[in-house]
Image: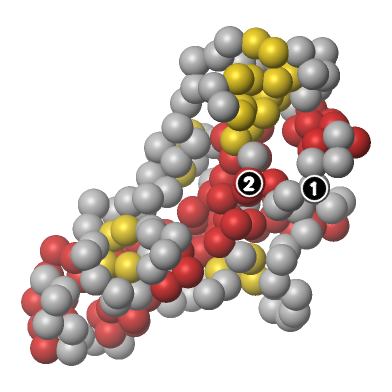
Amino acid sequence: MSFPVDLTAALTGASVAQLHNWRRTNLLEPEVQGNPVRYSFRDVVALRTFVALRRDVPLQRIRKAMAQLREWDLTEHPAAYTLVTEGASVFRVEDERAIDLVRRPGQEVLLSLADAFRPFENMQGRQVVDFKRPRPRLEVEAQRLGGWPTIQGTRVPYDSVAKLIVGGVDPDDVHRFYPSVDSRSAHDAADFHQEVIQIGGRAA
């Protein structure tokens, strides 16, 4: 499963323009090659981490952190690393240790770690959704449909439900198409779909 730019922007907090710039400058090259641009689940996780870090540190420090990982021959996908900040540097967390990547590369520090998946406000003031629950009745599970947002407790993609509603189906009637989807879940799917298309700058 791969993620289009607008859904990636909604789940990560990056703007469409930022995603374009970060591709162009090789901060993160999407694993999925092709046109139109699409991202892997790991790409989405890494990008959300970058956006969360960017609230507190300049982008140049994030670039320096990624360069330091490569210098140490740590060449896994960026999503494989837990990266955090205390406002001045970027740290890689491993086995309850935090290693400075920017200011004093290699030095260990103690940090209070934050969960990168929780909601936060990005630099543009946009509230970024809870990654695991972009709406109360939607879920993101890495092992379910490749991490595509689904209706809670089901394998029904959120956008399949949302497109029914856009097409004129009343949320109370969605259960006729998907028996496991109640009207509240249908409303959540439609609401998140609206956010995704607004971020992507396109019409429903």
Residue 159, image x, y percentages = 37, 75
Amino acid tagged 1: Thr
- Against 157, residue 24 (above or below) is above
In the rendered structure, the answer to whether residue 61 lies left or right of residue 129 reads right
> Looking at this rendering, what residue extends furthest in the right direction?
71
Closest to the observer: 117 or 10? Answer: 117
Relative to 170, residue 84 above or below: above
Figure quadrant of the C terminus: bottom left
Answer whether labels 2 and 1 touch (C-beta < 8 Å): no
Residue 30 position, x and y percent, is 72, 63
Query: Does any portion of residue 53 appear in the rendered image?
Result: no
Quarter of the figure with residue 19: bottom right
Q: Looking at the image, which residue is at 57% across and 45% down?
A: 48
In terms of secondary structure, where does tag 1 sit?
A: loop
Q: Residue at x 86, y 41 (%)?
A: 73
Horizontal arrangement in the rendering, residue 177 relative to residue 93 (left or right): left
Q: Which residue is mark 1?
A: 75
- Residue type indicated by callout 2: Ala
Decide: is 74 above or below 35: above
Categorize mark 1 by other alpha carbons within 10 Å: few (<14), some (14-19), many (20+).
few
Q: Is residue 172 visible?
A: yes
Q: Which residue is mark 2?
A: 80
Separation (CA) of disc 2 from disc 1: 9 Å
